Amino acid sequence: MTSGLLLHGGRVWTGSGAPLTDAVLLRDGVVTALGEDALAAAGPEDRRLDLEGRLATPALDEAHMHLLPYGLGLVEVNLRPDQVRTLDALLTRIADAAAATPKGAWLIGRGYDHTALDVARHPTAAELDRAAPNNPVFIKRTCGHMGVANAAAMRIAGVGHNTPDPEGGVIGRGPRGLTGLFQERAMRLILDVTPVPDEAAMVTAIEAAGRNLASFGFASASDMNVGMTAGLAELAAYRRALAEDRLQQRMWLVLSANPEGIAEAAWAEGLRPDVTDPMLACGAVKVFADGSAGGMTAAFMDPYLPGGTGVFCFPEETMHGLLALWHGRGFALNIHAIGDAAIEQVLKGMEDLPDPRPRHRIEHAGWANRHQRRRMLAAGVLPVPQPIFLYEFGDSYIDVLGPERANACYPMRTFVEEGHNPSASSDCPVSTVDPFVNFFTMRTRQTSRGRVLGAGETLTAEQALHAYTSAGAFARFAETRRGTLAPGMDADVAVFDTDLLEASPEAVKGARCDLTIRGGQVIHDRHGVFANGALG
């Protein structure tokens, strides 16, 4: 008999609706026993850890994020709103980075929010030129759906005054010519000429991102648009990370099926959908239907307050053709749609697909209306929302949509009460991957400025925890293995310094994860209790 680990002396939450217990025994990568049975089954060969009253739960599951881009972004210029609130501060960060970068080398920044800047607008190409006169520069808005390039970057991309807008994209133009702003699919004009990281750099990024996620309690995560940074080489990087034991989370890899993505090439090379692999499940594809609400490119039926109804990435015929193609090949569809018009386009296409439907998803589903939600339930289509968007972008929603429409966004309680089983996620690096801020938001519906959007859509602490555990596992076909703690389930466990079920939302916001275990292996140990990840 191999040695295991007995966690005891605290509160063990095993899943929504189940009674809490005080002990769990992990052995051979699975949960062996709970409560009194765990205490009785633990032998002298098993290591014991006194929880000292702390809460243990199933490890968290990040249902929608971009793990490789997050890892690569750790070395990009950080322009997130919690760091940068003025245009001068943004340009100073670019100038400082340029001073430390060789002439002619690319500078990439990530995370600015023009609605949070003091000037309430995007930076311009001319301003980036002055900050970095000797480097091509591209900075991406926090949503990832638009960004600004300087003149050097546009020259390298071959973009000029007469360059037409690509399908599903917009090139910013003003009275004096190009502004440098690229929205939606127009971003590819710049991104396709930026340097591509090599495999070693991508493996390092996967490992760095994974260690950061593990420090928050995540044993499962996702990469929701694989192939848009380095093509098929991204799959090779993930396989190498696994082979070298540098992959921290159980990954849900979703191939980019936009025409510029890698899904078609991966299919041609023989990749087929697989939702069963315990570490690298690759059973879904992603297509973008629209953009972001804060950036006013999410496609709505009614106009934004400043005007316009957003951007459709594809005409309906093209979108429905892509859905039918990948459904027919057996892939789950994880389709980005935020505005109600985009949700309608996607949902109509999904409803027309023949059975069986393999648990298709609408990612974000931010403004799904009542009629659409009923149809999603009938078709078995899952919403995969990001409550954290309220905290980080809710104030901009009020500005561009008005209070009434902002209050209706990401209706978590309605999703739960209607039976949708929504997961919780961050879309990181769009938003912070910190789950405790997300827990706070689910329980309060507060923006970062303290305004409350849709107070009736708050969740209980247990509902929020379910959304980050069991619902996340369900969204990736893993509910029989992960997301709850019961004998035979994978030994994926997180231990927190704060009782997420009993503490106030404000206290939860400052919580820390003390221990993260994946398959019986320690992948995060805040207090250094275990040596080299070993339980014995």
Image (tube, helix red, strand yellow):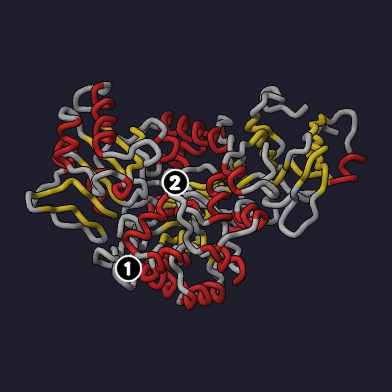
Which residue carries the number 2 mark? 431
* Quadrant in the picture for residue 419: bottom right
Camera-nearest residue between 78 and 421: 78
> Residue 515, relative to residue 312: is it above or below?
above
Give the SS element for disc 1. helix
Camera-nearest residue between 232 and 43: 43
Total residue callouts: 2
Q: Position of residue 311 (x, y in %)?
A: 28, 63
Within 10 angstroms of label 1, few (less than 14), some, or many (20 or more) residues?
A: few
Q: Position of residue 59 (x, y in %)?
A: 66, 44
Give the SS element for disc 2. loop
299 horizontally vs 252: left or right: left
Residues under labels 1 and 2: Cα distance?
30 Å
Q: Please, what is the three-letter code of the amino acid marked with disc 1? A: Thr
Q: Is label 1 in contact with label 2 (beta carbons under 8 Å)?
A: no
* Quadrant in the picture for residue 520: top right
Q: Please, what is the three-letter code of the amino acid marked with disc 2? A: Ser
314 horizontally vs 497: left or right: left
- Residue at 55% over, 33% down: 211
Looking at the rendered image, the quarter that the C terminus falls into is: top right
Q: Position of residue 170 (x, y in %)?
A: 21, 56
Q: Earlier in the sequence, mark 1 or mark 2?
A: 1
Which residue carries the number 1 mark? 318
